[in-house]
Image (cartoon, rainbow, N blue to C red):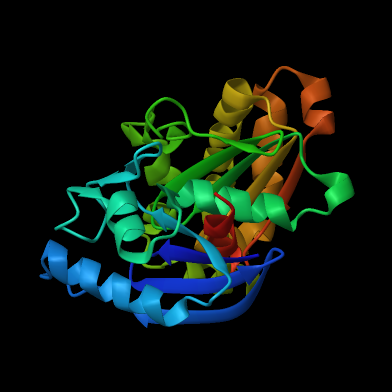
Amino acid sequence: MMTLGIDVGGTNLVLGQVRDGQIVRRVSTPWFPHEAGLQQTLDILSEQIADMLTPDTEKIGIGVPSVVDVNRGIVYDTVNIPSWTEVPLKDYLEERFHLPVAVNNDANCYAMGVYQGYPEDAKPEVLVVITLGTGVGMGIVDRGRLFVGANCGAGELGSLPYRGATLESYCSKQFFAGTGWDSLSASIAARDGDPRATALFADLGKRVGDLLCTVMFAYDPSHIAFGGGVAYTYPLFRQSMEARLKRDFPYRKSLERLRIDVCTGDDIPVIGASLI
């Protein structure tokens, strides 16, 4: 069975032909012009899809950075695509290509891609995947199935109020605003022994630790996996994150069983989209 997985990213549209959980062909193309109207964007998307379909393609899965009516496949207020305020994407693509289409939030697709990457004999019971990028995204896989909530809003813990802002402001690339560094340059400085950069990542770890405490109370996961650009700096904030988690989360046995991983493969979102 061939499935076409599509990741609608912030700047690129990535499509992959997926068979048995592996990408056999992958294409990345620049995203729509910001000023493009709805029909123009749908035409561009359709052209890319048509080029990737094969005679044995049986399904299309697409992850979009927005709120999604999962059952009806309607996309609302998509990030970076102003014309996508309310788009019946599932119906449009099914009518055009005569194939089943599934649509979901991109963080949920990422979570399914991470889940797929675990060995069959070691699949997580409850997996929470946290993407630390421009913002904080989250997807929950409970015993092999996505948990999205009633309105595809489950996991939006980054929006919780925190220290006069939100958790997302302190646990993503936004954390580095005003420091004179971005996450990459700060990590280089920290690895070179810069004490200010080292202290910065120690503080980041405390904030991520607070986020994980919230995740533990909300979902009681057996596994947590980090993705996104900030996840590459995990060794720099891990110690203070773990210390914060051990200090503030009261259920020690849960922490003893918890496994924390880092998953940063480029193909994860596309594979996940093929699985929804």
User: Picture coordinates of residue 137 (x, y %)?
Assistant: 46, 46
Q: Position of residue 178 (x, y in %)?
A: 32, 58
Most foreground residue, 266 or 177: 266
Depth check: give the residue in front, 268 or 249: 268
Q: Is residue 229 above or below residue 125?
A: below
Left of 38 or right of it: where is 55? right
Q: Residue 123, how many percent across, how many down?
A: 80, 44
Residue drawn 45% across and 33% down? Answer: 157
**Looking at the image, is 97 positioned above or below residue 84?**
below
Quarter where residue 255 is shown: top right
Where is the N terminus found, in terms of image quarters? bottom right
79 to the left or right of 213:
left
Nearer to the camera, 101 or 142: 101
Residue found 47% across the figure and 81% down from its top = 27
Residue 116 percent location from the top left of the image:
70, 54
Would you place residue 237 above or below residue 245 in this image?
below
Q: Residue furthest right?
A: 121
Is residue 51 shown above or below 70?
below
As drawn, is 180 to the left or to the right of 208? left
